Image (spheres, rainbow, N blue to C red):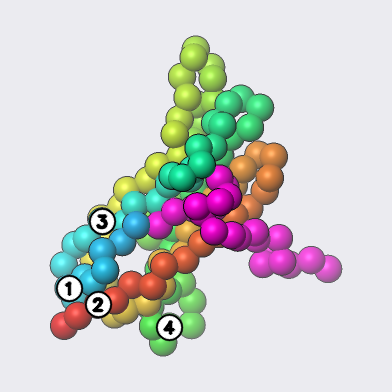
Amino acid sequence: MKTIGTMLQSGDWKGEKHVPVIHVPEKVKKGEAFEVKVLIGEEIPHPNTLEHHISWIRVYFHPEGAKFPIEIGSSEFSAHGEGEVFNEPYLTLKVKVDKPGTIHAVSYCNIHGLWENSEELNVEG
């Protein structure tokens, strides 16, 4: 039996248009809000057409030492050409944390499946 983890694809976002790009500050202060930006196609644009599009992005934070990650945000992209309206897969979140950890992002392309990426988050007292 295949698990979902075996179906997640990854790569260098500079050479692969499906990998979620995660932008977080180099360091954040404990308990202070900061921005997490996640987008698809920063270096190589994703087509985002009716035939080939990103349907959603989910973002998680896995605090250092915790057993499970916590979902901190998600976005559905439903405008794929109806009425000539198209979404760009881009998500911005404001988050506060008390511990360092890892930001994980997972996206879904209707043709090429699930893609993941992660970024370490450094927290100072």
- Find out whether residue 63 is within the magenta segment: no
- Examine the rendered structure and indicate whether residue 92 appears above or below residue 88: below
- Percent from the top left, x then y, of residue 42? 44, 44
Q: Quadrant of residue 98?
A: bottom left
Type of amino acid under label 4? Ala
Q: Is residue 59 left or right of residue 31?
A: right
Vertical order, 96 against 85 (above or below): below
Amino acid under label 2? Val
- The answer to whether residue 70 is seen in the rendering is no
Cβ atoms at labels 2 and 1 below 8 Å apart: yes
Residue at position x 53%, y 17% in the image: 82
Label 1 environment density (alpha carbons within 10 Å; few <14, some 14–19, many ≥20): some
Q: Are marks 3 and 4 in contact (CB under 8 Å)?
A: no
The residue stretch that appears in magenta: 1-22
How many numbered discs? 4
Q: Which residue is mark 4?
A: 66
Q: Which residue is mark 1?
A: 29
Residues at marks 2 and 4, CA–CA distance in whole angstroms: 15 Å
Q: Which mark is residue 123?
A: 2
Residue 87 visible in the current orientation: yes
For label 4, the SS is: loop
Residue positioned 46% across, 45% down in the render? 43
Q: Quadrant of the N terminus?
A: bottom right
Percent position (x, y) of residue 104?
46, 64
